[in-house]
Amino acid sequence: MCCEYDLLPTYSTIQYEKLTIRTGEYFEGDEQMEGDVVTAFDLIGNIEQVKEPDGKYSYNLLIYRYHCGNIPDTPPAWYMKKQWPYWEK
Protein backbone atom coordinates (compact mmCIF):
# COMPACT_ATOMS: atom_id res chain seq x y z
CA MET A 1 0.00 0.00 0.00
CA CYS A 2 1.22 3.48 -0.81
CA CYS A 3 -0.77 5.16 1.91
CA GLU A 4 -0.56 3.42 5.28
CA TYR A 5 -3.07 5.27 7.42
CA ASP A 6 -5.07 2.79 9.52
CA LEU A 7 -8.19 4.95 9.53
CA LEU A 8 -8.21 5.63 5.78
CA PRO A 9 -11.14 3.27 5.04
CA THR A 10 -13.11 4.79 7.92
CA TYR A 11 -12.65 8.45 6.97
CA SER A 12 -12.65 8.15 3.19
CA THR A 13 -14.58 6.57 0.37
CA ILE A 14 -13.29 4.62 -2.62
CA GLN A 15 -13.63 6.70 -5.79
CA TYR A 16 -12.08 4.17 -8.19
CA GLU A 17 -11.16 0.60 -7.30
CA LYS A 18 -9.13 -0.12 -10.46
CA LEU A 19 -8.56 3.04 -12.46
CA THR A 20 -6.37 1.95 -15.39
CA ILE A 21 -3.65 4.37 -16.51
CA ARG A 22 -1.86 3.59 -19.78
CA THR A 23 1.17 5.07 -21.52
CA GLY A 24 0.70 8.82 -22.02
CA GLU A 25 -2.13 9.06 -19.48
CA TYR A 26 -2.07 10.42 -15.93
CA PHE A 27 -4.33 10.75 -12.92
CA GLU A 28 -5.08 14.16 -11.49
CA GLY A 29 -6.91 14.05 -8.18
CA ASP A 30 -9.75 16.33 -7.30
CA GLU A 31 -10.21 18.73 -4.40
CA GLN A 32 -13.57 19.81 -3.06
CA MET A 33 -13.67 23.22 -1.44
CA GLU A 34 -16.06 25.38 0.51
CA GLY A 35 -14.77 28.90 -0.02
CA ASP A 36 -11.05 28.80 0.76
CA VAL A 37 -11.23 25.60 2.83
CA VAL A 38 -10.48 22.15 1.38
CA THR A 39 -13.22 19.76 2.53
CA ALA A 40 -12.13 16.63 0.61
CA PHE A 41 -9.35 15.48 -1.69
CA ASP A 42 -8.39 12.41 -3.71
CA LEU A 43 -5.33 10.32 -2.99
CA ILE A 44 -3.76 7.18 -4.41
CA GLY A 45 -4.10 4.26 -2.00
CA ASN A 46 -2.36 1.61 -4.10
CA ILE A 47 -0.63 1.19 -7.47
CA GLU A 48 -0.55 -2.15 -9.29
CA GLN A 49 1.59 -2.65 -12.41
CA VAL A 50 -0.09 -4.76 -15.12
CA LYS A 51 1.62 -6.19 -18.22
CA GLU A 52 -0.70 -5.88 -21.21
CA PRO A 53 -0.92 -8.62 -23.93
CA ASP A 54 1.04 -6.35 -26.31
CA GLY A 55 3.97 -6.25 -23.85
CA LYS A 56 3.35 -2.68 -22.65
CA TYR A 57 2.63 -1.84 -19.04
CA SER A 58 -0.36 -0.13 -17.50
CA TYR A 59 -1.16 0.70 -13.90
CA ASN A 60 -4.29 0.10 -11.86
CA LEU A 61 -4.83 2.75 -9.20
CA LEU A 62 -6.94 2.55 -6.07
CA ILE A 63 -8.24 6.08 -5.49
CA TYR A 64 -9.67 7.25 -2.18
CA ARG A 65 -11.51 10.50 -1.42
CA TYR A 66 -10.46 11.70 2.03
CA HIS A 67 -13.14 13.74 3.80
CA CYS A 68 -11.38 16.37 5.91
CA GLY A 69 -14.34 16.97 8.21
CA ASN A 70 -14.33 13.34 9.32
CA ILE A 71 -10.94 13.30 11.02
CA PRO A 72 -10.90 11.60 14.43
CA ASP A 73 -11.22 13.59 17.65
CA THR A 74 -7.90 12.14 18.82
CA PRO A 75 -5.01 12.81 16.42
CA PRO A 76 -3.56 9.63 14.84
CA ALA A 77 -0.20 8.29 16.07
CA TRP A 78 1.63 9.72 13.02
CA TYR A 79 0.39 13.26 13.71
CA MET A 80 3.27 15.50 14.73
CA LYS A 81 3.03 16.81 18.29
CA LYS A 82 4.58 20.11 17.19
CA GLN A 83 3.31 21.52 13.95
CA TRP A 84 4.91 24.39 12.07
CA PRO A 85 6.42 26.69 13.19
CA TYR A 86 8.97 24.39 14.76
CA TRP A 87 10.43 26.80 17.26
CA GLU A 88 9.39 27.05 20.91
CA LYS A 89 7.11 29.92 21.88
Image (spheres, grey):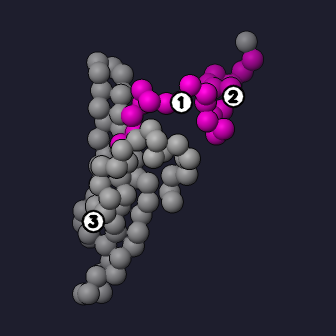
The amino acid on which the numbered mark 2 sits, given as a three-letter code, is Lys
Q: Is mark 2 on a helix, strand or loop?
A: loop
Residue at figure coordinates x 44%, y 54% from the top left: 45
Query: Closer to the N terminus: mark 2 or mark 3?
Result: 3
Q: Closer to the camera, 40 or 86? A: 40
Magenta stretch? 65-88
The correct choice, above or below, for 15 with respect to 84 in the image is below
Q: What distance separates the C-alpha of mark 2 from that of mark 1? A: 15 Å
Give the main secondary structure, helix, strand or loop, of the magenta stretch: loop
Q: In this view, does 9 lie to the left or right of 56?
A: right
Q: What distance separates the C-alpha of mark 1 from that of mark 3? A: 32 Å
Based on the picture, tell me whether residue 14 belongs to the magenta stretch: no
| Residue that label 2 marks | 81
Mark number displayed over residue 72 = 1
| Residue that label 3 marks | 20
The amino acid on which the numbered mark 3 sits, given as a three-letter code, is Thr
Give how far across and how far down residue 60 sits, in percent.
Answer: 34, 66
Disc 1 crowd rating (10 Å Cα; few below 14, some 14-19, many 20+) is few
The correct choice, above or below, for 13 with respect to 22 in the image is above
Q: What element carries label 1?
A: loop
